Structure formats: C-alpha cells, structure tokens
Amino acid sequence: MKDFSRVTLFKYLSPQEINWLMVKWESREIARDTVIVKEGTTGDEMYLIESGKVEVFLTRGDLVLVLSELGENSFFGEMALLTDKPRSATVRAKTDCRLYVLKKPQFMEIINENPKVAAKFLLAMSEDLSHRIMVTNANLENYFLINRAIVDNESFRNLYILTHRAPSSSG
C-alpha cells in the first residue's frame, strides 16, 4: 500500500489510522480524457489521486472555465459525502490516473466505527474546503474589480468592446 502520510486529507491521522481508513477505499484506474464527475449530477463518492492529473472545470454554453488542475495526493468530490446536492463542477482525467474512491456508505462506516478518526478526517477536509472558499473569494474580488474597471472607465470599456467585437465581413 502507498504511503499516504503526505496527503493533506490525512494530516491529523497516525500511520495506523491511515491504514485502517484506506481499507474503506477502493482502487480505480481511469483512462485519459474520461469524465469522472459531471457537473449537475448527483454522486455518492469522493476521490483521492494516487497518480495522474485531473482538470476541474465549469461549462456555460460553449465556454469552459478551468477552476483547477489536481495531481498526486489531491482529492475531489468530497461534497458528495457531506450533502445530497448535485456536483458543482466537472472533473476529467488529463492523464491516465489511479484513484482511490470512498463511497458514502463506507464513509458512514468510518463515522460509526471510529468517530475519533472520522473527526480528524473531517477536520482536515474542512480546512481544505475553507481554503478553497478563501481562494474563490479572492478570485471573485478580482473579477469584480476588473468588471468595475471596464464599466467605469471609458478606455477599458472601448478596449473590451474592440477585443470582443465580431470580425466584420469587409475584413
């Protein structure tokens, strides 16, 4: 079994606790370009990346907004263990990947069988989610400031219009 001590999700767990916890996860091989999680669908599992890279993105019409690229020791899909809400983004394998998958029933077993390990696991997960919210807030602030500059400043507005204008038929 791989050494998972470098996974931030397990940072409060002892090696013995990690080994106990990992028995609940199943290994899965994922081919490059496979959609692992689809935005808007419901799920009941989270993923830990042992090897490979995935891309997390949103699709709005024909626009794609890449939120992040995740690699070894990263995790995603954890909200499916905590809520019954639809997935908030799509995740696609950028390379061939080896993932560990934790399904909700096994997550509930962890909580029931060893609340102390579950609490440490959830604490690390909560810290990561809090960090993601802080990064999202900073990005939203930047987008707000850029939008405000475009709206409030005629030079920015003209530049935006010029760069986003459809090409004319006269060339």
Image: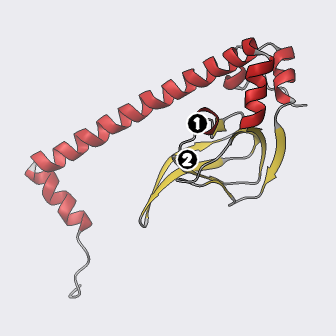
Compare residues 39 and 127 and report the one nearer the observer: 39
In which quarter of the view is residue 161 placed?
bottom left
The residue that mark 1 highlights is: 79
Q: Could you classify mark 1 by the number of other residues whose Cα lies within 10 Å: few (under 14), some (14-19), or many (20 or more)?
A: some
Which residue lies most toward the bottom here? 170
- In this view, 158 is above or below 74: below
Quadrant assignment, res 125: top right
Q: Residue at x 49, y 31 (%)?
A: 132
- Name the quadrant containing residue 1: top right
The three-letter code of the residue at mark 1 reads: Met
Q: Are marks 2 and 1 in contact (CB under 8 Å)?
A: yes
Q: Could you tell me how many numbered marks the image carries?
A: 2
Residue type, mark 2 in image: Arg
Task: Name the residue carrying label 2.
Answer: 87
Residue 93, numbered label: none
Q: Give the structural element (helix, strand or loop) at label 1.
A: helix
Quarter of the C terminus within the rendering: bottom left
Please indicate, yes or no, whether residue 11 appears anywhere in the rendered image.
no
* Horizontal and vertical percent position of residue 40: 52, 53
Q: Nearer the viewer, residue 162 or 101?
A: 101
Measured from the top left, where is residue 70 in percent x and y?
A: 62, 41
**Mark 2 Cα-neighbour bin, 10 Å: few <14, some 14–19, many ≥20:** many
Residue 27 point in image, percent of width and height? 84, 42
Residue occupying image coordinates x 59% and y 55%: 38
Left or right: residue 38 versus residue 138 is right
**Residue sticking out furthest to the right:** 1
| Residue at left offset 60%, top offset 49% | 42
- On the question of residue 105 being in view, the answer is yes
Percent from the top left, x then y, of residue 149?
Answer: 17, 44
